[in-house]
Image (cartoon, coloured by chain):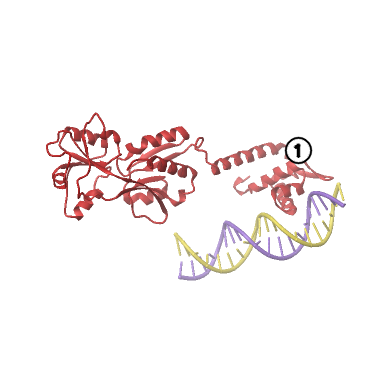
Chain colours: A red, B yellow, C purple
Amino acid sequence: MNTARIDLNLLVVFEAIYTEGSVTRASARLNLTQPAISHALGRLRTLFGDPLFTRQGHAMVPTPMARSIVEPIASSLRTLDGTLSRAFSFDPGKAQRILTVGLPGGEESSFLPPLMRRVLEASCIDLVTVSYDRAQLESRLASGKMDLALDILLPHSTQVLHQPLVVEQRVVLARKDHPTVGPGLDLETYLAQQHIHVTSIRQGDSLLDTELSRLGMQRRIRLRCQDYLAACRIVAETDLILTMPAELAPECLAAPYDNQVLPPPVGLPLPGMELYLYWHGSADGDPANRWLREQLAQVLAPMPR
DNA sequence: GGTCTTCGGACTCTAATTTG
DNA sequence: CAAATTAGAGTCCGAAGACC
């Protein structure tokens, strides 16, 4: 028997006739006409090579064959019903899913701890964070290689949906006894320093450097690295300085590094670093994806920017 | 390879007929 | 007489062929 050719609705009809003991009552229960059920019964009889039900007065009495198959069929229908119910009513506490969040740079340490606390408390979802090339944002979301992405405003088609989350403020880190950098840091002194740039991307300017270049200025980047904590330690032990989002990796701003945390110099062209959450339109209705979007929005919303 | 049209099979319906 | 079955018509959908 080729199960791919079987109309599974026939099994629903079979179970309804068996339960109701009547073609007419089965039709009422399934919201179909009585002849439609009768025809379905005819196809069931052909399929099983057995009458399945014989009419005895006003009742349809199951044959031994029908009695032998009703329980496994009813059980299978209950299993299918349960599977579909779980698919349509997402319960984060029970759903076994792995969701992948794309991050362009070393941005994990700011929001990942509070996000993970929420995920662990309320769900069975496993998280994976990955870095990615911004040119591949759309293709990776479309292919399902990433479920969500967190990034600055990027060009994208209408297939990709986005939601603004937060606007980042910047601070400048320098070691406490730095020879030239201190309170009242001006733009000229800032540009004269040697800098660390934290990014997961091997090439390409940051938004700040792009903006500086547009205004005919530039800064000397001596180190590109991927980790804010490592950069923070290097700041503490060298004369390099670091410009970073204020609440990204808050441990960078605290002891034991004891670095100076300074406001950016007046005149430094800091483009609005508004962070956006991206996801593909095909995942918009996915309850697990929606749930994680809500958690991310709630985690990032209270951050003082 | 993609789109459009045609054809045939399967399904459901109403109405009529048959059965117990 | 109530319920099941049959007959015929309409509709839907997938397969196949034509066309670009």
Residue beneath the point at 47% across and 34% down: A122
Mark 1 belongs to chain: A
Residue beneath the point at 46% across and 45% down: A290
Residue annotated with mark 1: A64
Q: Is residue A204 visible?
A: no
- Tell me if A251 is positioned left or right of A69 in this view: left
The residue under label 1 is which amino acid type?
A: Pro
- Tell me if A300 is positioned left or right of A256 in this view: right
- Tell me if A232 is positioned left or right of A131 in this view: left
Residue B16 position (above or below residue A160): below
Looking at the rendered structure, the number of numbered marks drawn on it comes to 1
Q: Nearer the viewer, residue A128 or A170?
A: A170
Residue beneath the point at 70% across and 39% down: A70
Q: Nearer the viewer, residue A67 or A239?
A: A239
Image location (x, y in percent) of residue A225: 23, 39
Image location (x, y in percent) of residue A131: 33, 43
Residue beneath the point at 24% across and 28% down: A256
**Outermost residue toward the top in this view:** A256
Image location (x, y in percent) of residue A254: 26, 32
**Outermost residue toward the left in this view:** A179
- Tell me if A108 is positioned left or right of A54 in this view: left
Q: Nearer the viewer, residue A181 or A32?
A: A181
Q: Is residue A97 visible?
A: yes
- The quarter of the picture where the C terminus of chain A appears is top left
Image location (x, y in percent) of residue A67: 73, 37
Secondary element under disc 1, as helix, strand or loop, is: helix
**Mark 1: few, some, or many residues within 10 Å (few <14, many ≥20)?**
few
- The quarter of the picture where the N terminus of chain A appears is top right
Residue C7 position (above or below residue A58): below
Q: Nearer the viewer, residue A56 or A116?
A: A116
